[in-house]
Image: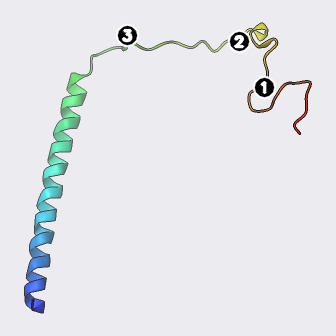
Amino acid sequence: MSMQDELTDVKRRLDDLARTVERLERNLSQSREGATRAQPAGRPENLVTIPDTPYDSSLWTDSDDEGLGARDRHAP
């Protein structure tokens, strides 16, 4: 293959790549527009509210510190 043929082939492939990227960008923008329209207004029902108040310390009674071992023992 001559140098000119190779350059022509590279240019053709770059043009194909540019067209493919443009098509993907259009599809992505259309998908995003569709996703924003499809979301219901207001708060979704499957969310769980977690209170800011501290947990009751009795929940942690007799529990070991995970990864650290028991409180009264030392690592070897």
Query: Circle 2 sits on which residue?
Result: 55
Q: Are marks 2 and 3 in contact (CB under 8 Å)?
A: no
Residue situated in front as seen by the camera: 73 or 2:
73
Q: How many marks?
A: 3
Disc 1 to disc 3, how far (Cα)?
Answer: 35 Å
* Sequence-wise first label, 1 or 2: 2
* Residue 48 versus residue 64 in the image, above or below: above
Quarter of the rendering containing residue 11: bottom left
Residue at 36% x, 14% y: name it: 44
Residue situated in front as seen by the camera: 32 or 12:
12
Query: The residue tagged with tag 1: helix, strand or loop?
Result: loop
- Left or right, residue 27 beside residue 65: left
Residue type at mark 1 is Asp
Quarter of the rendering containing residue 63: top right
Q: Label 1: how many residues lie within 10 Å, few (<14), some (14-19) or many (20+)?
A: few
Query: Circle 3 sits on which residue?
Result: 45
- Left or right, residue 55 beside residue 9: right
Disc 1 to disc 2, how far (Cα)?
Answer: 16 Å
Q: Position of residue 30 (x, y in %)?
A: 16, 38
How are the colours assigned in the image?
rainbow
Q: Nearer the viewer, mark 1 or mark 2?
A: 1
Query: Circle 1 sits on which residue?
Result: 65
Residue at 23% x, 29% y: name it: 35
